[in-house]
Image (cartoon, grey):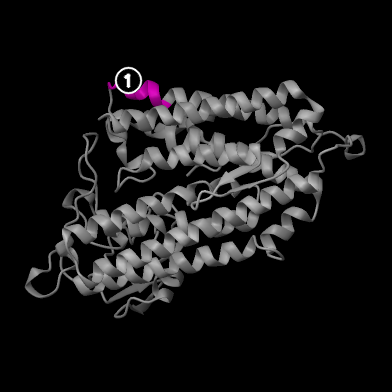
Amino acid sequence: MSRLLFAAFATTALCALPAYAVEKEAVLTTYADIAAAKYVDSLIAAKSLQDTIEAFLAGPSDTTLKAARAAWRDARVPYMQTEVYRFGNPMVDDWEGRVNAWPLDEGLIDYVDATYGGATDENAFAALNVIANPSFTLSGQTVDASRITPALLADTLQEADGVEANVATGYHAIEFLLWGQDLNGTDAGAGERPWTDYASGDSCTGGNCDRRAAYLRVSTALLVDELAFMSAAWSEGGAARDAVLADDTNGISMMLTGMGSLSYGELAGQRMKLGVLLNDPEEEHDCFSDNTQYSHYYDGIGIQNIYQGSYTRLDGTTVSGPSLKELLNETDPAIADQLETDIAASVTSLKDIVTATENGMAYDMMLARGNATGEALILGAVDTLVAQTRSIERAVTALKLNAIELEGSDSLDAPDAVFQ
C-alpha cells in the first residue's frame, strides 16, 4: 500500500485562533462519544458473529454457514463507520492492522487454487498454509504450530517476516475462512468454500477440518478481544479519548486528518481508483465475500456522521452533540455548507454503487476492462471523494489550524507509478 503523505494546508499562528460559541471541547466530546458508541456496536456485532460461528462449528451445514456469512456482513456495518478515526488518531491507526489489515496473502492461512502460485521473493510465506502444516521455519527457527493458538496467529503469523501481506487475524482472515477464494475474476460471484471444509471424518473436504475450525474459532475470539480493547480506549478515562481531549486545537486537527485521509488516499485512492487502473478484482476490499460496495458506503457514512455530530446505533438510538459543522459554520458558513454538500454527494455516489450491485452488476464486474458503466460509477465516486477532500482542506484553513498531513495514494498522485 502506498503511504505517500502530503501537507495540504497553510499554517496560521495559533494566537490568531477565533473564539467560538460552540466550544471545541464540546465538539471533541461528541466525537469521542460517537467513537465509543461505534466501537461498542462493533463489539456487539462481533460477539454475535462469534455466537453464529460457534453454532456453525457445532453443526456444519449449508444453512449454518450462510448464517455465519450473514453475521460477518452485519459485523462490517458498524466497524466500517469507525474507519474515520484512523490516521488522525495514532492509537487507532497503530491498532487497525490487527483487525482490518488488507490485502492479504491468503495462502498463508489455508489451501488455495493452483493458479495462486507459491512463495515469492516478496513473501516467502505467501503459500505457507499453516492449517495444513503443524510446523514451519521462521527466521531460522522451527515454529511449533501443532495447536492453533492466539499467540500463534497474533504474535507469530501476523506480519510474519515483516511482510504486511501476511495477515493472520481480523475481519479478512475470518472472511477468507468463511468464503474461500473468489475465483470468478471480473465475473459475478463470491468465494464458494463448501461447508464440508468444516465437516468431520470422511465428509471433510480440503483436509484438516479440525485445524480449520480451530483457526476460525481463535481468529474470531481475537477479533472480539481487540474490539473490546478499543471500546475501552474510547470510554471515560480511556487512552484514545484522553488523547483527543488533551488539546482542543490538536483534537480538531485529528478529526479533519481522519476525514481527509480516509476520503482521499485510502478510499478514493487505494481502495477504489487502484482497482480500476489495474482492472483487478484482487483490489476489492472485501474480495472473498463481494461485500466491498457496502464497506465503501459505510466508510462514507462514517465521515458524514462525524461532520454532522450524529450516529445512529444498532439499537436505533442516536448519539449526537455539538458538531464540527456547527463549529465551522461560525467561522465560514459558506465552507461549512459546501463541505456538507460535498459529503452528501460522496455518500450518494457510494450508494449508487451499492444500488448497481443490488441490480445485478457485481463490484467485480465494474472493474472489468471495457465496462464503461462500472468504471464511471467507481470513478464518479472517486471524484466526489476528492472534491470532499478539497473542502476539508478549506475547512482547516477557515478554522485557522496548523498544517496537517493527509494519506496519499499513487493511484491519485502518480498513476504511472502504479504500473512500474
Q: Of residues 128 and 328, which is closer to you in this image?
A: 328
Q: Residue at x 35, y 67 (%)?
A: 51
Q: Of residues 370 and 346, which is closer to you in this image?
A: 346
Q: Is residue 61 magenta?
A: no
Residue 168 horizontal side relative to residue 64, left or right: right
Q: What stretch is highlighted in magenta?
A: 370-378
Vertical arrangement, residue 188 with respect to residue 156, above or below: above
Q: Of residues 135 and 43, which is closer to you in this image?
A: 43
Q: What is the quadrant of residue 396 in the picture? A: top right
Q: Is residue 371 magenta?
A: yes
Q: Residue at x 55, y 42 (%)?
A: 302
Picture coordinates of residue 3, whole percent (x, y):
55, 43
* Element under disc 1: helix
Task: Please rate how many residues cluster around mark 1, counting C-alpha atoms within 10 Å: few if below 14, some from 14 to 19, many from 20.
Answer: few
Picture coordinates of residue 412, whole percent (x, y):
51, 29
Vertical arrangement, residue 83 with respect to residue 276, above or below: below
Q: What is the quadrant of residue 196 in the picture? A: bottom left
Outermost residue toward the left in this view:
202
Q: What is the quadrant of residue 60 in the picture? A: bottom left
Residue 98 makes an appearance in the image: no
Q: Residue at x 31, y 65 (%)?
A: 53
Residue 198 horizontal side relative to residue 18, left or right: left
Q: Which residue is drawn at 70% across and 64% down?
A: 236
Vertical arrangement, residue 169 with respect to residue 85, above or below: below
Outermost residue toward the right in this view:
15
Q: Which amino acid type corresponds to the residue marked 1 in the rendered image?
A: Thr
Picture coordinates of residue 345, whole percent (x, y):
53, 24
Instruction: Say which residue label 1 marks.
Output: 373
Residue 408 horizontal side relative to residue 79, left or right: right
Residue 320 makes an appearance in the image: yes
Which image quarter holds the C terminus?
A: top left
Disc tally is 1
